[in-house]
Image: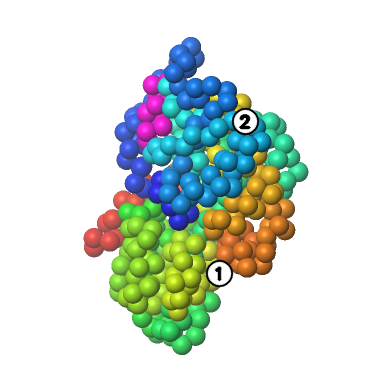
Amino acid sequence: MEDNRIGRRTVLRTAGALAAATAVTGCGTLMGSGGSRGSSSGGGKNKIVVSNSGGAYNDALTKAIYEPFAKETGITVTTVNYQSAQIIAQVRQGRPQVDLMDNTLLIFQKMARLDCLDAVDHDRLKSVKGAGIAEHQLPEHAVGKNVWASLMAYRTDSLKRAPKGWADFWNTHSFAGARSLQSAEADYPELEFALLADGVPLDKLYPLDLDRAFASMSRIRGEVKKFWNTGALPAVLLGRKEVVATSLWSGRADELIKQGQPVAYQWNGARRLTNGWGIPKGADNTDAAYKLIDFSLRPEVQAAFAKVFPQGPVVPAATKLLSDDVLATLPTSPQNLKTGFDTDVAWWDKNLEAVTKRWREWADA
């Protein structure tokens, strides 16, 4: 989730670094309450330093959020591309080099547990009050901003009819052909899809039944050509016709369709995860951070970002400002919200290490 160029970041890749950076003590315990912040992040009240994953994601943020914010407030936004482990190490030293982080709520769940983030005073955010943002997108130490999803895509020239959900994906008799699914090495494995294929309802997924999930994975394993470990790979496999169906991150399939590929996708059982804002403990310019967070949650700003990058707004009113064509590509459109589910980040934070170990043992068996 630290590589969000098409809408995501990698969790697993930084898990080991997170553990190394925080050791046993976490972050806050090594900072002290009287440490100097004179050379930390902000460098002035009219400048804010923001960490995000760069690439097309940063370009979209700059166009839809950073530049309009600077024009309105006079506060310039400087962006850097730090891994979360780097920021954790800076916080432990009492010298965070950023005022604000853009990452997933899963990363922030981990950083909050390690005492590396300030608690968010949601009362300081006018755009949050009465906005109808979902409760799970407003945790104590972060603020949700935009939503991406993992979903199913398939080749329309290879399948006689369109698969309607993960049960069809798992049905290799009626929907014959090679598949691809996400590996634990890319992020965290798609055990939820395995459970949905096995008949578990959307609202009964968590806590995940690991025995049932791995048994379901074993049933389709022989038809999976590749458990992909980078976000670009499933689109490549699908585009080359090496697989007839795959999981992939929302936005990737749209790129194939724009290229004229015979590809379609559907939102049934899509796994949503939220990107958001977090303030590193000890950050220098928190006033500017709150102003930028507040600005980014205005409905018109949320809509502007969704128009240039395929991630859904967390503010429901923003969807009313978007065309039907744009809404069809977003996981938080009113229609698509009904058919997917939100990742339980607390469950994954607690169980990621154990699931990854079990996945590797299963994959090597």
Instruction: Judge from the rendering whether residue 87 lies leftward or rightward of residue 271; answer left or right.
Output: left
334 relative position to 170: left or right = right
- Image point (70%, 40%), residue name: 127
Residue shown at 43%/27% (left/top)?
97
Q: Secondary structure at mark 2?
A: loop
Picture disc at residue 74: 2
92 drawn magenta: yes
Disc sitting over residue 249 in the figure: none
The foreground one among 70 and 272 is: 70
Q: Could you tell me residue 81's position as x and y percent?
A: 41, 39
Q: Between residue 343 and residue 38, name the one nearer to us.
A: 38
Nearer the observer, 148 or 49: 49
Q: Mark 1 packing: few (<14 Cα in 10 Å), some, or many (20+)?
A: many
Q: Which residues are magenta?
A: 85-94
Tell me the residue that label 1 is attached to.
268
Spot occupied by residue 172 in the image (x, y as percentages of width and height):
39, 80
Task: Look at the image and tell me whether residue 362 can be seen.
Answer: yes
Instruction: Mark 1 or mark 2: name the one nearer the start of the chain.
Output: 2
Mark 2 nearby-residue class (10 Å; few <14, some 14–19, many ≥20): few
**Helix, strand or loop for disc 1:** strand
Q: Is residue 308 left or right of residue 182?
A: right
Furthest residue in direction bottom, as rendered: 160
C-alpha distance separating marks 1 and 2:
44 Å
Which residue is located at x 72 percent, y 53 percent? Answer: 317
Q: Which is closer to the viewer, label 1 or label 2? A: 2
Quarter of the image with the C terminus in it: bottom left
Q: Main secondary structure of the magenta part?
A: helix
The kind of residue on which mark 1 rests is Asn
Furthest residue in direction left, as rendered: 364
Give the percent coordinates (x, y) of residue 173. 40, 85
